[in-house]
């Protein structure tokens, strides 16, 4: 606009221009103030370099299978609570705070539980896979599911039904290994073991993956989880999903395969409710409320598959990985098994006597917690015990992986695999210092089932075979999923004893 034109303006035009500018300025500063209020304070901000802040560094780490170590190093350098900054995106995406301070973990999981639900951050990301299942809901919906699911874990069911299924599937794994020639991928076999076990215990289904490994369901299950993990790390995922691009391109097909498979399980189960299948996890839900919709029951199947298959198979695989690098510990586990089980073999009562095996499993879960990072939503702005201010709507994550490697919690030998530490401890660590099974009101419901499956299987494996890694240990890499898989599998030499 030239000066001569402006000279022709009357005072009303000037007033309007000044008025509009003031409103615009006011709006801009109010928006900036509101956006600034959304930023966490009182913890270390990891700003990274460049326009997208720390995001490119995290993406690169995920591609190199180093994501968990990268974030653990950030904790080592910057402190127990960190705020990941995403450069120019930071005013538009959910602020992400990660803590490994046990006081904060106890506060968010127990003392101020109501303020830290799963919330929309997690449930939006996971809805395509988990729907309205127990992992993905809060409030009344969660209480109802938790109550009914708890009925599943009675002492009687463990002793009879659950232990029988575990034993039968352990036998199938031993047969597979005896018949096998050459190296085997134990990660693959252990996933098939836990899948068949949770199929039978959870919804009375004979999945039969130990007999037939090539199921499209298995691939889709892994791929679907990988997509969910990327959603956490890629703020524009909803646009990608809408356009069907990038990692979202194939995700749609995988989610569909899983839903169809689970729906078929529900259909079969509904026709067999008066058999033993009716006492399975999902069978109990169907009997407790016959009006439950097929969609809801399908969600339940996928939730229990996620809970029951991956976590436990991964925990056993990492345990085996560590045992193969410590001949001493493998031998010690074996001699305890032979002492406790003798010639008659294992039974349910003997499981509790395998104290060194128990310590070995806890030690490997410390170093490789199946759920390495767990996210909650901040319902109302709050200040954590370490002084961090978390704004309403932020995501607050606790990182079991970094906690398990923290010298502050475990001492100077934190990085060492030493099961003896569990037998030497005068007081065991609280579940908030070692939240591998979560803690507080939402503590893992399947903890006991997992320990029974893992002890039964490892007892069978170590008691009958010697295991050696068939590849260099540095080629075994953690996978970027919601749980801590092995992208490379676990190739082993297996020698009968
Ligand atoms: C080594 C094995 C396992 C580990 C490390 C583990 C760990 C966990 C963790 C960290 C959570 C909290 C997840 C979250 O906040 O979303 C959880 C929840 C849960 N787990 Fe496990 N889990 C294991 C095995 C199992 C098994 C075998 C089952 C059996 C079905 C199971 C059933 C559940 C259920 C139902 C929940 C949800 C509890 C709730 O929200 O109230 N878990 N588990």
Image (spheres, rainbow, N blue to C red):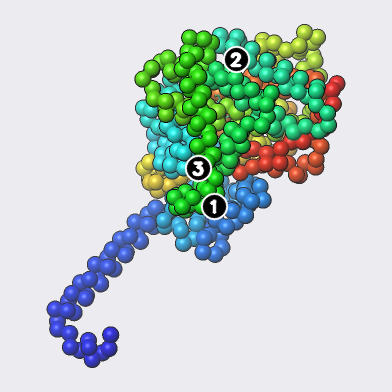
Which mark is first along the chain, 2 or 3?
2
The image position of residue 45, as x and y in percent, is: 51, 55
Asked if one can make out residue 436 in the rendered structure from this viewpoint, the answer is no
Q: Which residue is mark 3?
A: 252
- The residue positioned 71% from the left and 19% from the top of the image is 172
Which mark is first along the chain, 1 or 2?
2
Residue 246 image label: 1
Judge depth for marks 3 and 2 and give the one in front: 3
Asked if one can make out residue 10 in the rendered structure from this viewpoint, the answer is yes
The image position of residue 311, as x and y in percent, is: 60, 31
- The secondary element bearing badge 3 is classed as helix
> In the image, 388: left or right of 177?
left
- The secondary element bearing badge 1 is classed as loop
Q: Quadrant of the N terminus?
A: bottom left
- The residue positioned 48% from the left and 34% from the top of the image is 130
> In the image, 206: left or right of 16?
right
- The secondary element bearing badge 2 is classed as helix
The CA span between labels 2 and 1 is 41 Å
- Camera-side residue of 79 and 48: 48
Query: Any atom of ligand 1 within 8 Å of the CB at mark 2?
Result: no
- Camera-side residue of 172 and 141: 172
Q: Which residue is mark 2?
A: 162
The image position of residue 469, as x and y in percent, is: 80, 35
Which mark is first along the chain, 1 or 3?
1
Judge depth for marks 2 and 1 and give the one in front: 1
Residue 382 image label: none
- The residue positioned 54% from the left and 39% from the top of the image is 254
The CA span between labels 3 and 1 is 11 Å
């Amino acid at each position: 606009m030239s000066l001569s034109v402006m000279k022709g303006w009357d005072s009303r035009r000037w007033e309007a221009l000044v008025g509009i500018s003031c409103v615009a300025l006011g709006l801009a500063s109010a928006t900036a103030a509101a956006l600034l209020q959304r930023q966490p304070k009182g913890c270390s901000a990891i700003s990274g370099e460049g326009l997208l802040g720390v995001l490119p560094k995290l993406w690169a780490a995920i591609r190199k299978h180093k994501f968990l170590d990268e974030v653990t190093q950030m904790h080592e350098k910057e402190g127990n609570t960190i705020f990941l900054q995403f450069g120019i995106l930071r005013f538009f995406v959910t602020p992400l705070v990660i803590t490994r301070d046990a006081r904060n973990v106890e506060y968010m999981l127990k003392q101020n539980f109501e303020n830290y639900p799963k919330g929309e951050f997690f449930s939006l990301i996971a809805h395509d896979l988990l729907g309205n299942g127990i992992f993905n809901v809060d409030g009344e919906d969660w209480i109802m599911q938790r109550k009914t699911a708890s009925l599943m874990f009675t002492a009687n069911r463990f002793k009879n039904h659950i232990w029988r299924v575990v034993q039968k599937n352990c036998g199938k794994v031993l047969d597979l290994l005896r018949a096998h020639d050459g190296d085997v991928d134990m990660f693959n076999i252990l996933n098939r073991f836990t899948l068949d076990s949770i199929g039978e215990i959870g919804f009375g289904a004979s999945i039969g993956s130990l007999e037939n490994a090539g199921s499209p369901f298995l691939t889709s299950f892994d791929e679907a989880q990988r997509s969910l993990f990327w959603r956490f790390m890629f703020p524009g995922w909803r646009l990608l999903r809408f356009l069907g691009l990038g990692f979202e391109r194939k995700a749609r097909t995988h989610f569909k395969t899983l839903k169809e498979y689970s729906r078929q399980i529900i259909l079969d189960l509904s026709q067999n409710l008066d058999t033993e299948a009716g006492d399975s996890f999902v069978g109990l839900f169907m009997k407790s409320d016959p009006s439950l919709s097929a969609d809801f029951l399908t969600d339940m199947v996928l939730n229990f598959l996620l809970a029951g298959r991956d976590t436990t198979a991964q925990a056993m695989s990492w345990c085996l990985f560590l045992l193969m690098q410590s001949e001493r510990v493998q031998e010690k586990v074996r001699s305890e098994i032979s002492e406790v089980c003798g010639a008659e073999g294992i039974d349910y009562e003997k499981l509790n006597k395998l104290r060194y095996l128990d310590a070995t499993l806890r030690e490997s879960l410390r170093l490789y917690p199946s759920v390495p990072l767990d996210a909650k939503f901040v319902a109302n702005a709050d200040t954590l015990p370490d002084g961090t201010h978390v704004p309403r709507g932020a995501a607050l994550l606790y990182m079991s992986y970094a906690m398990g490697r923290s010298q502050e919690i475990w001492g100077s030998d934190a990085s060492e695999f030493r099961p003896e530490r569990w037998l030497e401890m005068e007081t065991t660590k609280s579940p908030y210092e070692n939240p591998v099974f979560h803690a507080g009101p939402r503590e893992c419901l399947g903890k006991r089932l997992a320990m029974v499956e893992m002890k039964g299987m490892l007892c069978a494996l170590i008691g009958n075979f010697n295991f050696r890694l068939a590849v260099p240990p540095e080629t075994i890499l953690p996978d970027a999923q919601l749980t801590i898989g092995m992208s490379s599998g676990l190739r082993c030499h297996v020698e009968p004893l």
